[in-house]
Image (cartoon, helix red, strand yellow):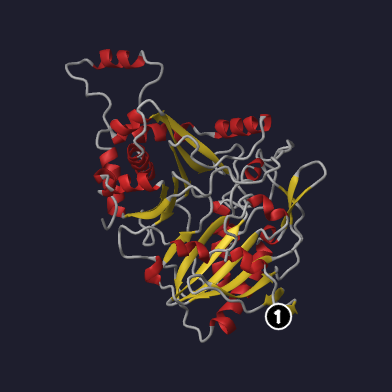
């Protein structure tokens, strides 16, 4: 049975408990499930422990862009806490910590609403978030983190999250956020789903780490408190008209394989060194020919300068090149590498890092598949580097103006069969959260927004520049990528 349907079924026995000291209303019922799926023990609504004084927040262009995407699904795997009973100790503790955290992030406990003019707002009405406690004691850490370097992400991992394939627009009538705590055989998984029209990755991890800090009793730094101001160029008076058929922009039934490839710090450094092995564009002048050389150079419209390619751009270049080869595309076909970019510091005027909401746009780099597959890796990296460098404040503003001329949601998917789309970021502090019993063993995502060509970059657990790359590809493309010696040379543990 679909997990969401379990939550919607009639509940045979109900217990309501309301205490404003914790501001938690619990709706508890015993449920059953097959042994292959987590069994839901209880479901409740958690409210902020203080009433919100924040008014309605109008969605920005960047927020509206995500209406037709799935809820973000991210979660962390933890060693089992040394507590006598989850049901009587851990679960109430997490609910109370979540209640306190929601008071700092009231939009997450609200709902979306559309006014008579068509503008969409987050109403911070303290309606609460879903909190689910489940058990799956036949699943172990080894099942989720197989030691085999050739293993796909196990399908069971998707059942550790609430709101599977839930579309962000539906937050008009259901919670903006939901949590699921699942007891495993030797660990605990904390999975979260949140409406992508309310938050991007940067805001999400700020919330998640604040939640963890409150759980372990840490003092919350004022610099991490969210900024809800909406006075920026991201705001618009243009109304977005949605199609009658609300659905994601890609085929969720299309088969794919999903793997996580790990790249150690040493491997990333080796890759970066390979990409940057030749940094000299012009030979040094000899026999007093410097003046003549400079004259030739200055005849160009612009002097060529040498740029060191970053570690992440080097990895993206490797992925773009090797996936393009694995797809066996015609040489003349255009292939696109799309990279989500945080525009908070690229805008003019800039937004602070603690700005709450979406502040993302997409950098697209295009080239012929034949060039990407056959030219040196340095060439691929240079194309990506040029696109990133050109993406300045004027570009951000131009993208916003283009949206106002033709307002529409961002289209996720690989519609031409030649697109690679990179999301998330190895800079997100995914392993900085500690709820009081240690850092996560692993970070995972659910089944949201996945299609052939979707990539997500996570920091490696041990830090230091290591990267875990979540790769989603058509089965035949994944098989060819796994056989690509250039790609696998840099994969750790291969």
Residue 413 seen anywhere in this rendered image of the structure:
yes
Residue 436 seen anywhere in this rendered image of the structure:
no
Q: Is residue 146 left or right of residue 216?
A: left
Q: Position of residue 47 (x, y in %)?
A: 70, 69
Residue 142 in which image quadrant:
bottom left
Q: Position of residue 272 (x, y in %)?
A: 30, 43
Q: Position of residue 156 (x, y in %)?
A: 46, 65
Q: Quadrant of the C terminus?
A: bottom left
Q: Judge whether 128 appears above or below 245 on screen.
A: below
Q: Residue at x 34, y 59 (%)?
A: 151
Q: Position of residue 121 (x, y in %)?
A: 74, 49
Q: Residue at x 44, y 43 (%)?
A: 453
Q: Is residue 484 left or right of residue 221?
A: left
Which residue is situated farthest in the right direction here? 116
Q: Judge whether 276 appears above or below 187 on screen.
A: above
As helix, strand or loop, the secondary structure at mark 1 comes to loop
Residue labelled with disc 1: 13
Q: Residue at x 55, y 40 (%)?
A: 361
Residue 243 in which image quadrant:
top right
Q: Is residue 175 left or right of residue 155?
A: right
Residue 393 in which image quadrant:
top right
Q: Which sits in the foreground, 64 or 387?
A: 64
Q: Which sits in the foreground, 439 or 13?
A: 13
Which residue is situated farthest in the bottom direction here? 84
Q: Quadrant of the N terminus?
A: bottom right
């Amino acid at each position: 049975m679909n997990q969401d349907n379990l939550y919607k079924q009639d509940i045979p026995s109900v217990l309501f408990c309301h205490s404003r000291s914790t501001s938690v209303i619990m709706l508890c019922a015993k449920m059953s499930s097959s042994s292959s799926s987590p069994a839901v023990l209880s479901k409740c609504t958690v409210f902020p422990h203080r009433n919100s004084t924040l008014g309605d927040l109008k969605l920005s262009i960047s927020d509206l862009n995500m209406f037709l995407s799935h809820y973000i699904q991210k979660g962390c795997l933890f060693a089992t806490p040394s507590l006598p009973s989850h049901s009587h100790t851990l679960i109430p503790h997490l609910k109370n910590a979540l209640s306190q955290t929601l008071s700092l992030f009231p939009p997450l406990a609200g709902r979306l609403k559309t006014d008579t003019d068509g503008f969409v707002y987050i109403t911070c009405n303290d309606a609460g978030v879903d909190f689910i406690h489940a058990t799956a004691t036949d699943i172990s850490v080894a099942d989720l983190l197989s030691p085999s370097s050739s293993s796909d992400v196990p399908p069971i991992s998707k059942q550790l999250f609430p709101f599977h394939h839930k579309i962000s627009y539906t937050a008009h009538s259901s919670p903006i956020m939901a949590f699921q705590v699942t007891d495993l055989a030797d660990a605990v998984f904390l999975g979260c789903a949140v409406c992508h029209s309310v938050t991007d990755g940067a805001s999400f991890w700020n919330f998640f780490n604040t939640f963890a800090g409150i759980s372990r009793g840490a003092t919350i730094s004022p610099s991490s408190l969210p900024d809800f101001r909406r006075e920026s160029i991201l705001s618009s008076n243009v109304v977005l008209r949605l199609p009658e058929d609300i659905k994601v922009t890609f085929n969720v039934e299309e088969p794919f394989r999903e793997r996580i490839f790990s790249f150690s710090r040493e491997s990333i450094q080796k890759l970066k060194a390979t990409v940057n092995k030749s940094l000299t564009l012009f030979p040094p002048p000899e026999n007093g020919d410097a003046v003549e050389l400079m004259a030739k150079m200055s005849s160009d419209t612009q002097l060529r300068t040498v740029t060191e390619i970053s570690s992440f751009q080097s990895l993206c270049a490797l992925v773009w090149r090797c996936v393009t080869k694995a797809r066996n595309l015609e040489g003349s076909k255009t292939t696109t590498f799309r990279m989500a970019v945080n525009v908070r510091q690229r805008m003019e005027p800039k937004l602070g890092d603690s700005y709450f909401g979406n502040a993302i746009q997409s950098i697209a780099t295009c080239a012929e598949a034949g060039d990407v597959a056959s030219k040196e890796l340095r060439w691929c990296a240079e194309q990506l580097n040029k696109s990133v460098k050109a993406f300045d404040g004027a570009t951000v503003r131009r993208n916003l103006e283009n949206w106002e001329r033709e307002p529409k949601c961002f289209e996720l998917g690989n519609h031409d069969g030649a697109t690679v789309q990179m999301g998330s970021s190895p800079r997100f502090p995914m392993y900085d959260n500690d709820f009081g019993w240690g850092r996560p063993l692993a970070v995972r995502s659910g089944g949201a927004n996945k299609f052939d060509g979707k990539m997500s970059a996570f920091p490696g657990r041990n830090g230091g520049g290591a990267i875990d790359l979540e790769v989603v590809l058509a089965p035949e493309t994944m098989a060819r990528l796994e056989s690509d010696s250039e790609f696998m040379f840099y994969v750790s543990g291969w």
